[in-house]
Image (cartoon, rainbow, N blue to C red):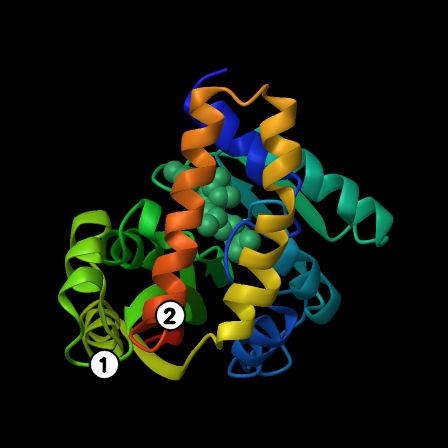
Amino acid sequence: MTELDLLVDFHKNAKRQGPGSTTDTLKALSFIDLDGKKNPKVADIGCGSGAQTMVLAQNINGQITAVDLFPSFLEKLKQEAQTLGLQDKIITLEKSMEDLPFEEEELDIIWSEGAIYNIGFKEGVKQWQKFLKPGGFLAVSEITWLTNTRPNEIESHWNAEYPQIDTASNKIKILEENGFSPVGYFHLPPSSWLKNYYEPMEARFDDFLNKHNNSSVAQSIVEGEKEEIRKYSAYKNYYSYGFYVAKKV
Ligand SMILES: C[S@@+](CC[C@H](N)C(=O)[O-])C[C@H]1O[C@@H](n2cnc3c(N)ncnc32)[C@H](O)[C@@H]1O
């Protein structure tokens, strides 16, 4: 198994592959008004095993296309949709977010929780805008600075990991410069990181290491995650996922 295979294996048995919560998804959804539109078409990009896809399917009366690069996440998502009786509302699509097959102005909502960084916020906003109908909505969560200045350790870490990390005002500017009008913003609270993501992750470390015979690659994945948790615990006042909801002008 390559390191990537191991990473997917580690994350696929989790309820979610990034920070978030049902409350966060519903809060973002509350900013969206489709004016009673019948059967809205929704894409959930970088859906992972679909924690937020299920919430969307339960709360939107339309069809959701759940897109991810990795088939094992989509398999989990399909199983969960079956369990919840949502299989008729969700179609899965194994595709890269850089090469989406939608038509221009096909979609009413583009949703993406904790995933747009894979293409880059700016590139994602620019490329995906054309798939939305005028008046359609983009709802994305994206790593965001909560303050204008922060300690060197965390600033240099994130600038190396993801140079597009920025403050909400700068992210909103990108939305405005690319044909969107912002309708809502909030950032995820610590419980969405700790209770919903890092604590369940910590509980999987031992099983994951045993399953892979304590291989050096498995150990380095666990050490990497532990370091990520340490940084979050130390610096959670300085960054979070910002949730941006914007309407296509
Ligand atoms: C941090 S996870 C978030 C998953 C899910 N939205 C959640 O919040 O639980 C990022 C997701 O993006 C997916 N991904 C990474 N690169 C991708 C790409 N190029 N195209 C589509 N999905 C991608 C990963 O497989 C993963 O499921």
Q: Is residue 21 left or right of residue 174?
A: right
Q: What whole-number distance in Å separates the C-alpha atoms at marks 2 and 1?
A: 10 Å
Q: Is mark 2 within 8 Å of ligand 1?
A: no
User: As drawn, is 54 to the left or to the right of 18?
Assistant: right
Residue 138 drawn at (x, y percent): 42, 67
With 234 as the anchor, is 155 left or right in this view? left
For the point 48% across and 59% down, which residue is it?
113
Indicate the secondary structure of the residue bearing disc 1.
loop
Q: Secondary structure at mark 2?
A: strand
The correct choice, above or below, for 12 with respect to 243 in the image is above
Locate the C terminus and report the quarter of the image it occupies. Answer: bottom left
Residue 196 image offset from top left, x and y in percent: 60, 63
Q: Nearer the viewer, residue 102 or 115?
A: 115
Indicate the amino acid at tag 1: Thr
Image coords of residue 90 (percent x, y): 69, 49
Q: Mark 2: which amino acid? A: Ser
Q: Position of residue 30 (x, y in %)?
A: 57, 83
For disc 2, the marked residue is 240
Classify residue 173 by image quadrant.
bottom left
The label number, if any, that marks residue 115 in the structure image: none
Residue displayed at 42% across by 65% down? 141
Q: Are the two marked residues, 2 and 1, in contact with CB atoms closer than 8 angstroms?
A: no
Q: For mark 1, what is the residue?
A: 147
